[in-house]
Image: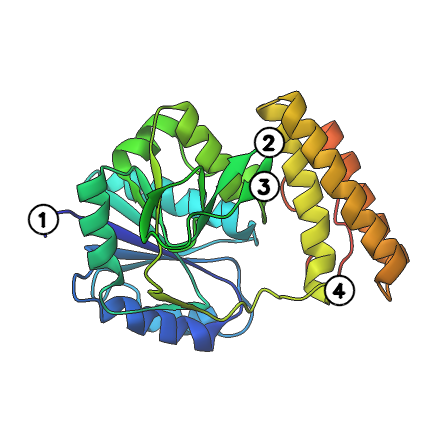
Amino acid sequence: MSQQVCAVIVTFNRVDTLKTALAHILAQTVPPAAIVIVDNNSTDGTRAYLSTVDGRQQIHCLYLDANVGSAGAIAEAMRYGLKQDQYDYFWILDDDTFYEKDALKDLLQHSEAGNFDLLGLHGALIRFGKKRPLLPDRQLQVADYALIDGALIRTAAIKKAGVVDAIFFMMCDDHEYCMRLRKHGCSIGVLKNGADNRLYLGGQGSFTRATLWRGYYSSRNHLIIVKRYFSFTALIAYLLMQAKLITAAAVFAPDRFQRVRLRLCGIWHGLVGVGGKTLDPQTLKFIR
């Protein structure tokens, strides 16, 4: 294939899984032309490891002085890749997901055949302000939203719509980006082929520690999106969802007071337009 792809890996304090994730990218049957690894100011030896691969096999490492989250790191990588002015696509990756050897090849083939500007491996339709599942029996289909992790994005679409917005830090940045792409006339698709093995090291479950900070950033960032692309339908859907989540936390969560407080803080910060990294995911303390 003649298309030039810039693969982007965002990492933070996961040096062991990063090594495995990078090995899977290097083993692709259709390899990317370049791999940009963005280190979000890791403290676990990640930088020492990256110094051993930086500059080899078209690997370029960006070392950030602060943790700007996945949104900020993806934005940095996109800006770096755009300056090179030689890539047709960007392939956005996470450091805790391992891809089958034909993952990039399949994404390229289906993106070209379907003329998609962004083609992801997971996604949804948006109906009345809420995400709805795609058709279960169709491998390739048009979507309103696609998860940015694992997604292949045309460089022309990035130039048209801009890079991912760093204001989100974590959570909802891909939701906003898909809305922005669609606003600029770009097409979004989902290829459900099971090419990714996701470890979900960011945290899963209903009342885990990770869902505390995720609840804050989700409620904040979602409201920022509602304000930016306002509709009464989206606002009502947001209010109903937050009421449901706050009620569930207040009734069932063992850490109900902290959980409700963080979500309410997220709503307030979204309302007044506070963005970026405001809550430290590791300490669960506000930093500004």
Observer-side mark, 2 or 3, equals: 2
Observer-side mark, 4 or 2, equals: 2
Which circle's residue, 4 or 2, is located before the other in the chain?
2
Q: Label 4, label 1: how many angstroms apart (C-alpha)?
A: 47 Å
Which circle's residue, 3 or 4, is located before the other in the chain?
3
How many callouts does the rendering have? 4
Amino acid type, callout 4: Phe
Which circle's residue, 4 or 1, is located before the other in the chain?
1
Inspect this view and state whether residue 165 appears.
no
Amino acid type, callout 2: Phe
Does the residue at mark 1 contact the one at mark 2 (Cβ under 8 Å)?
no
Which mark, by number, is residue 128?
A: 2
Secondary structure under badge 1? Answer: loop
Image coords of residue 56 (percent x, y)? 23, 66
Observer-side mark, 3 or 4, equals: 4
Secondary structure under badge 2? Answer: loop
Which circle's residue, 3 or 1, is located before the other in the chain?
1
**Which residue does the image show at 68% across and 34% down from the upper left?**
237
Q: Label 2, label 3: how many angstroms apart (C-alpha)?
A: 23 Å
